[in-house]
Amino acid sequence: MSRTLRRRLTQDSHGRLEWNCPRGCGCANFYPGSFDPVTNGHLDIIERGCKLFDEIIIAILVNPEKKALFTVEERREILEEVLTLVESDNCTLRVDSFEGLLMRYAVEQRADAVVRGIRAISDYEYELQMALMNRRQEPRIETVFMMAAEAYSYVSSRLVKEVYSLGGTIEGLVPATVEERMRKKFGRS
């Protein structure tokens, strides 16, 4: 664990570990993803992350090789709109986008940690490999894994797009604004 994070993890009088990150200490968290589209699972990770960090940078990964449903600018607009629904507990939420190496961007943003949501063992295997490579690139920045809430343990952006494109319902899986924008994208009334 990095020294920055270790200082923030303390024991209470009963020996239980507590996260000690008083507001203003600069505890920054970086949550990267495609967010194409943002799901309620993403928002759950952000909301719970706000209990741990002063600031969460929600960073949209720009991958020119991948065909996206929404443009980076549309994803940014959607995120900024739906983040107003998140109980942020005085945590600063900021939306940004980046290309290239994750760790390079994290260093530029002075992030202490990268948070990744884990839904299943298959996610863990992939994310563990990425975390180890990221640690090799930048050992000072930790990867924090957060388990998906049970209600969202099967929800992914890819699955949301697939179900919707085949005429299925996505109610409860994405914020209402995402569902509305998807209706427009797919030409549904």
Image (cartoon, grey):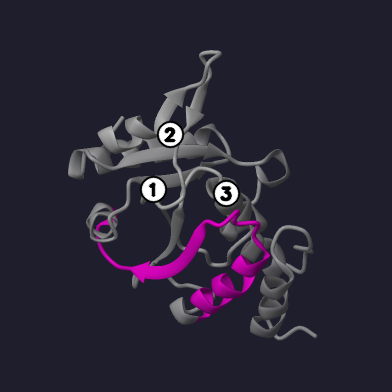
Residue visible at 46% across and 50% down in the picture = 23
Residue 127, horizontal then vertical, whole percent: 41, 40
Label 3 and label 1: CA atoms lie apart by: 17 Å
In which quadrant will I find the N terminus? top left
Disc number for residue 19:
none
**Residue 28 colored in magenta in the image:** no
Residue 85 relative to residue 132: left or right: right
Q: Give the range drawn in magenta.
A: 74-102
Residue visible at 27% across and 55% down in the picture = 110
How many callouts does the rendering have? Answer: 3
Residue 184, horizontal then vertical, whole percent: 69, 85
Residue 173 relative to residue 26: left or right: right
Q: Name the residue under label 1.
A: 27
Q: Say which element carries label 3.
A: helix
Above-or-below relation of 108 to 103: below
Residue type at tag 3: Ile
Q: Name the residue under label 3.
A: 45
The crowd level at tag 1 (other Cα within 10 Å; few <14, some 14-19, many 20+) is many
Q: Say which element carries label 2.
A: helix
Give the number of the mark in front: 2 or 3: 3
Label 2 and label 3: CA atoms lie apart by: 19 Å
**Which of the 4 quarters of the picture holds residue 2?**
top left
Q: Mark 2 points at which residue?
A: 125
User: N-terminal of the two: label 2 or label 3?
Assistant: 3
